[in-house]
Amino acid sequence: MLAMVIDDSKAIRLILGKILKDIGFEVVDAANGVEAMERLKEVGKVELALVDWNMPEMNGYEFVCEVRKDETYKDVRLMMVTTETETSQVIKALEAGANEYLMKPFTKEMIQEKLSIMGISVG
Amino acid sequence: MNISESDFQFITKLVKELSAIALEPGKEYLVESRINPLAQKEGFASIEELVKKLRSEPQNGLRNKVVEVMTTNETSFFRDIHPFETLKNFVLPELIEKREKTRELNIWCGASSSGQEPYSFAMLIKENFPQLDSWKIKYIATDISDEMLKRCRDGIYSQLEINRGLPAAMMVKYFERQGTEWRVKEDLRKMVDFRYTNLSENWPYMPPMDLVMVRNVLIYFDVEMKKQILGKIKKLMRPDGYFFLGAAETTLNLDESFERMNYKQSGCYRLRQG
């Protein structure tokens, strides 16, 4: 299973990447939405993408909108992992096609529980 | 910080007296991890100092606080998904069909802790069985801790708690943000009647129950107390009602009146028929 971590913070990419690897994913990452779109085209389908909201060039919300425009990626599970905690932001992300939403700070257990909610079975 | 054997014995005796919960030798780590933060919060330099206070002033309100921290368990929304799936797919549809004439359902959640379980179940009902809006639903949730009951009634959760197990779509539908916390919306809060009950003492009156959830609690009691509690649950249940235990719990060798249902890891039981 292939997952993508999209966050402009290298530290967060490392932490989320390690959690996903521990769970059993292969992981690729990107530092913003533009890079993530390019990476998606390179690797083909990913099963899961964890997406930060605030990033340069293309933010996480715009990335979700872009991905959901393309039928090729309709099965990709998208989860926002962000410091944005306003109810209106959560609703906006879900309406744009995010499958789940997790507010930072997070733990490995929270990630696992959210994956389970999205129907991704974890070890 | 290591707890001394005599302090450990003092705490386990106190907890057993006030809640019947049996903390076996080997649970020193658990006592330490729960009592240490309490000692700091109450201004004691160590667990030893806290126990000294309890020994010198037996009627001090600290006793209840010790019992509360020892009987409160970490939980999350929709903890162990299997019982909720079983309730949604099998148990509630069956009960709704059977109670179609009376349009009444009585439900009891026997250890509500900080409220995630009763509220998860309330959300499950709202999401999947809108027809029950017009039914008379008596939904009682009980706990031994006054502090936890207050938390349940307030229905306020930190961001860390709200992140645990709750689908985001339900979070925005059933909770409202208050600063850095999230509060259960009023219509969901009003569904649940939170009450004090010590499972090891006499239980206050409750109506005959269609559905009983006493999950992840029996494991803390000794065999005799488990048998007593199961006996009382049996009397409380309607003959065709259902009963849920935690996945690691069983009625086996305790009470043969219960029959385990073959629903995947859900800890679902009913009374043996005939």
Image: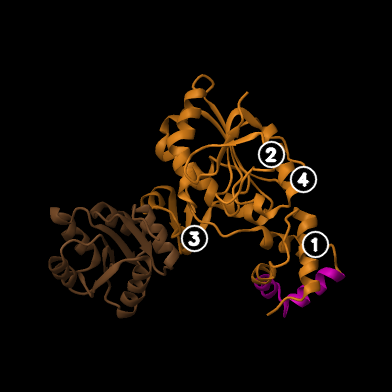
**Mark 2 or mark 4, earlier in chain:** 4
- Is mark 1 in CB contact (under 8 Å) with mark 4? no
The question of residue B262 being in magenta is answered with: no
Residue hosting label 1: B13
Q: From the viewer's perspective, is the residue at label 1 or at label 4 nearer?
A: 1
Establish if B148 lies above or below B58.
Answer: above
Q: From the viewer's perspective, is the residue at label 3 or at label 4 nearer?
A: 4
**Mark 1 or mark 4, earlier in chain:** 1
Colour of chain B in the image: orange
Q: Look at label 2 and name its amino acid.
A: Asp
Chain for numbered disc 4: B
Chain for numbered disc 2: B
Q: Look at label 1 and name its amino acid.
A: Lys
In the displayed structure image, the side of residue B54 where residue B189 appears, left or right: left
Of all residues, the one furthest to the top in this rendering is B101
The quarter of the picture where residue A5 lies is bottom left
Q: Can residue B70 be seen in this view?
A: yes
Establish if A110 lies above or below B224.
Answer: below
Q: Look at label 4 and name its amino acid.
A: Glu
**Mark 2 or mark 3, earlier in chain:** 3
The question of residue B44 being in magenta is answered with: yes
How crowded is the residue under tag 1: few (<14 C-alpha within 10 Å), some, or many (20+)?
some
Residue hosting label 2: B255
Q: Which chain is brown?
A: A
Where residue B132 sits: x, y (%)?
A: 46, 31
**Mark 3 or mark 1, earlier in chain:** 1
Q: Look at label 3 and name its amino acid.
A: Glu
Residue hosting label 4: B201
Identify the element where label 2 is drawn.
Answer: loop
